[in-house]
Amino acid sequence: MVDTANSKVPRPTYKREVIASEAVVASNHPLASAAGAELLAAGGNAVDAAVATLFALSVVEPMMVSPFGAGFFLIRDGRSGDVVFLDNYATVPAAAQPTMYEPVPDSLEYETVDDANSVGYRAVATPGALKGWVHAVEHYGRMALSRLIEPAIRCATDGFVASAYLVNLIRDSASAIERFPATAEVFLPDGAPPRAGQLIRRLAFARTLRQIADEGADTLYTGALARAIVADMQANGGLITLEDLADYRVYERAPVRGEYRGYQIVSAAPPSSGGTHIVQMLNLLSAFPVGGEGLKFGEPGYVHLLAESFKIAFADRREYMADPDRVHVPVDELISTAYADRRRAEIDPTRACGHVAGQFAEVSRFMGGEGSNTTHCTVIDADGTIVSATQTLQSAFGSKVTAAGTGMLLNNHMSLMDPLPGNTNSIAPGKRVLSSMAPTIVLRAGRPFAALGTPGGKRIFGAVAQALLNIIDHGMSLQAAVEAPRVWTEGAQLEIERGFSDVHALRSALEALGHHVTIVDKVAGGMNGVLVDADGWLHGAACWRADGVPIGISGGAAKPSLESGVPR
């Protein structure tokens, strides 16, 4: 099929976009998108819909998100135009020590012996998900929290059908899941992964969601649920205490802003590196003839430019990105056009090069890997309020631990901390964990144009940048832009998706330029987003890499009678 809406360059797409007049909810599961649409239809705004969607995702996309996870919101108020970035990411528990894990020698991915920082109770960091979701609703929503959780409770109680996508991820994690009986009971029924199409019910989690609906976020941070989880932690060697939970704070930070070919880019700020490096890469590419009569999508010269800009961005990420409350992160310098001009001169259009970090007055250092198991939702309502929210458990099913009696999966964000002491991102009590998430909003002449985001760990910001280039430079529809083949590198290997036309010829041409190329099934995860076209129609899209579904709302109230001013 071909999606041609708002497109200069039609491309085949696996899924179809939705077009609506009033509102759109896009997420990586149909039941979650339906939950958001339900709240919009009930009078909620985009924030209410996004939070309802996230609660539902915590049921039906359990490998990706949980109230005991972490993430970021980017919210643009449709009336004032103000944009706020909510940081509800995870923090290191107070009991954590720099030498608490035994590192795997020479690992650049923060691997530790026996996977102690990624599987089990000692891998769990202090969560920000639930407190962030509630903060968003209390400050920017319209409806009661309890109402927003109702669709999720229904899904958990009545059950949902396991997709092939979920089953495959359960199968990949089965050996770790089986170590934790409460997790295995749900996701390995009869000792094996469920079949695609099999009903999964999460009754214990439904009770926990009801407890949250009745008692609010306090139950997880200072109340009964907090006490239950800490007791389970203490019984199993975990780190988190009641003090860790009670001390957790959500921060409102200024988003990162840039401009590309007349479009305003608004994205995630540190402790996410995503928005900074999206703006940095777009700055680097702004002087090259991308799209139009210049470099076409999928051409070797275009992919080469992407790869070189990625390598520059990742060199800077390794050098400078960390918790902004602990070290100086030179965001303004990294996103300046003057810096892009200087670094652009290092790109040779005829050969692949190694790139090092730029030099600034303040220096920090970060290395390590991120899991790709995250989720994203995007919502726009009739007032033009937009929410772009990325949330995660870190790895698939997080730590694989389900807290006793709660049905709730716990994160493994400690796997993102450097197990070697003495480095900028080494373990320290209270430190904010670094991310690559990139919930992004694009404005045109100050008005909403697009919003999108994706799972994908370190590959997130590169994937989002490519989608923006697909729309702005290559004239693709939103659906085509999020589904189009992607590339990724941070220096050693250049990954290219096999979906490129004549992918083997592309690999050969890139290898002739000096790249070490690997063909992969997918780069990053299931992207979704919304777009407002020139006529005001709202487009929603979700790509083939996950179970994503956009749902649109059109129509509206009855037309008033000209005589009486009331419907008849």
Image (cartoon, grey):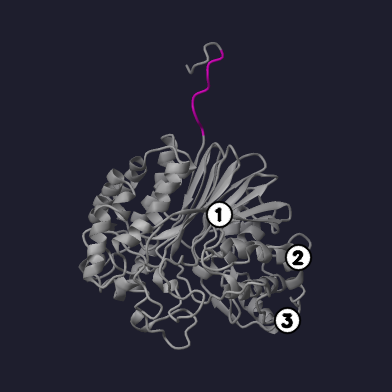
Quarter of the image for residue 293 reads bottom right
- The residue furthest bottom is 105
Residue 200, above or below 419: above
Q: Residue at x 46, y 55 (%)?
A: 548
How busy is the neighbourhood of tag 3: few (under 14 within 10 Å), some, or many (20 plus)? Answer: some
Q: Nearer the viewer, residue 303 or 347?
A: 347
Which comes before the other along the chain, label 2 or label 1? 2
Query: Magenta segment, which residues?
Result: 555-562
Q: Nearer the viewer, residue 350 or 98?
A: 98
The picture places residue 386, in percent across and down from the top left corner, at 54, 45
Quarter of the image for residue 183 reads bottom left
In this rendering, the label closer to the viewer, 3 or 2 = 2
Which comes before the other along the chain, label 3 or label 2? 2
For mark 3, what is the residue? 351
Q: Secondary structure at mark 3?
A: loop
User: The N terminus is located in which quarter?
Assistant: bottom right
**Disc 3/disc 2 C-alpha distance (Å):** 24 Å
- The circle on residue 452 is 1
Q: Is residue 233 visible?
A: yes
For mark 2, what is the residue? 338
Q: Residue at x 50, y 81 (%)?
A: 108
